Image: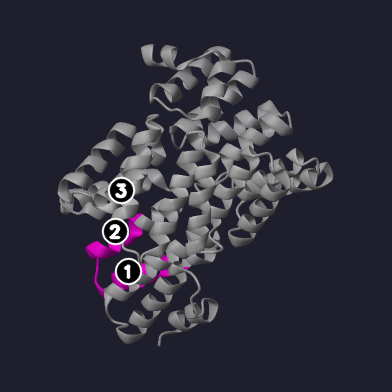
Amino acid sequence: MNAWLAVFLAVSPLSATTPAESALAQAQALVSREPGQSAGYNALALAAARRGVETADARFYQMADEALRQSFAAEADNFEGRKSEVCLLLARHEYAQAAESAARLNRQVPDDVAVYGCLVDAHAGLGNYPEAISAAQWMLKLRAGNPPGLERAGRLREVSGDLAGALEATGMAYDATPASDIESRARLLTRMAHLNLAAGDPAESERFAHTALGLISGNSAALGALGEVRMVQKRYDEAAGLFRRQHDAAPRPQELFALAKALAAAGRSGEAVEIFAAFEREASAVSGQADNANQELVAYYLDQAKAPLKALAVARLEIARRHDIFTLDCFARALNATGDSTAARAQMAKALAVGTADPEILRHGREIGVGPSVAAAR
C-alpha cells in the first residue's frame, strides 16, 4: 500500500454508516486490490466528493484531488477520471470551470448521459437556464425515463414556476430509482418535501421529510426540510432543534443562519445573537470561495445587521460568478437597499423573467416594484 493510501485510510476508516461512506469504503477496497488501475481511484474520487458534500468537510475534497492524481498517473487523461473531475468541480460549486470541462467531454463522447447531467448542473448553477434545459432534454432523449434526467427536469421545472410539473418529474424519478439506492431515494423524497412546502402543503411536506429520515436518520437535507416545515407551522423551538441537528451533521454556515432565524422567531434572542455572530464569522471566511454562503450573508446584512453596503459588496462578489435567480434576487435587494432602485429593478426583472414561483423572490420583487408580468414584458 502506498503512503498516500495509508494516510487516507487512517483519516477515513472503512466503517460505513451512510451510503456515501459505504461507497467510500468500497472504493478504498478496490484501490487496495488494484492499486495500479485508474478505475478504483476514479471511484474513490467520486465517493470522497460525495462525502465532502454530505459532511461539509473540505478534507474529503482534498482526498478526491489526490485520488484523481493517482488515476491520471495510472492512465493519462482517462475519460472516467475526467468525468469524476467535473463532479468534483460541481461539488465545490466551481460551475464555470465545470461547464467548460463538461463541454469538452461532451464533444469527445456526445452520447454520455452522465456528462449531460454535469452540463445541466453547471449551467443551472450559473443561471444559464436554456443551456441547462437543453442538456436535460438530451439526457431524456438518450435514455428515456432515467432517474437522473427526471430529477434534473424537476429542478428546472421548479425554477420556471411549474411546481406541479416539478413534483411529477421528481416522483417519476423516485419511482424509477432502485430501492437499494437509499441515498438517491432520500434525496428525492427531500426534494418532494421541499416542493410540497413551496406549493403550500406543509402536511405532505412533513410526510416526505419523515420518510426520507426513515431511510437515513441523520440526513442533513431532510432535517433541514423538516425544520422549514416547523417554521411554517410556527413551531420554532422544534425548528431550532432540527436546524441544530442539521448543522451537527454538516457544519455549514447556511445551517447556522437557519438556526439563528429559528431561535429569533422562538424569542430566544440571546442565543440568536450568538448564532448570528458565528454565522457571520464563518460565512465571511468563505465569502471569496466558490462554495460559500453568500446568499445567506446578503440576507443577514440586509435583514438582521442592517448593513446594506456590506450586503452589496458580497452580492457583487457572487454576481461576478453566476446569474441564477437566487443570486439575481440577492443582488437586486442589495442594490435597492443602497438606493440604486433602477438597477435593482433591472436585476429583479431578470430573475422573475424565468417564471419562478418562489414566494420569497416574488415578495422581494413586489418590494422593489417589479412583478412577474413586468418582468415577462422586458
Tell me whether circle 1 and circle 3 mark residues in contact (CB < 8 Å): no
What residue did someone put label 3 on? 172
- State the mark number for residue 83: 2
Q: Looking at the picture, how far across and down is residue 71, in whole percent?
A: 31, 71
Q: Badge 1 local density, few (<14 within 10 Å), some, or many (20+)?
A: many
Mark 2: amino acid = Lys
Q: Is residue 377 above or below residue 278?
A: above
Tell me whether circle 3 and circle 2 mark residues in contact (CB < 8 Å): no
**Residue at the spot 80% in from the left edge and 48% down from the top edge:** 271
Query: In the picture, residue 56 is in which quadrant?
Result: bottom right
Q: Earlier in the sequence, mark 3 or mark 2?
A: 2
Q: Earlier in the sequence, mark 2 or mark 1?
A: 1
Q: Looking at the picture, how far across and down is residue 345, in whole percent?
A: 51, 16
Q: Which residues are magenta?
A: 63-86
Q: Which element type, helix, strand or loop, lies under badge 1? A: helix
- State the mark number for residue 42: 1
Magenta stretch encompasses residue 270: no
Mark 1: amino acid = Asn
Query: In the picture, residue 55 is in which quadrant?
Result: bottom right
**Residue at the spot 29% in from the left edge and 58% down from the top edge:** 83
Q: Which element type, helix, strand or loop, lies under badge 3? A: helix
Q: Residue furthest right?
A: 270
Q: Please state which of residues 50 and 107 is positioned toward the viewer in this rendering.
A: 50
Disc 1 from disc 3: Cα separation: 29 Å
Provide the major secondary structure of the magenta segment: helix
Where does the N terminus fall, quadrant-wise? bottom left
Given this view, does label 3 or label 2 mark the residue nearer the observer? Answer: 3
Tell me whether circle 2 and circle 1 mark residues in contact (CB < 8 Å): yes
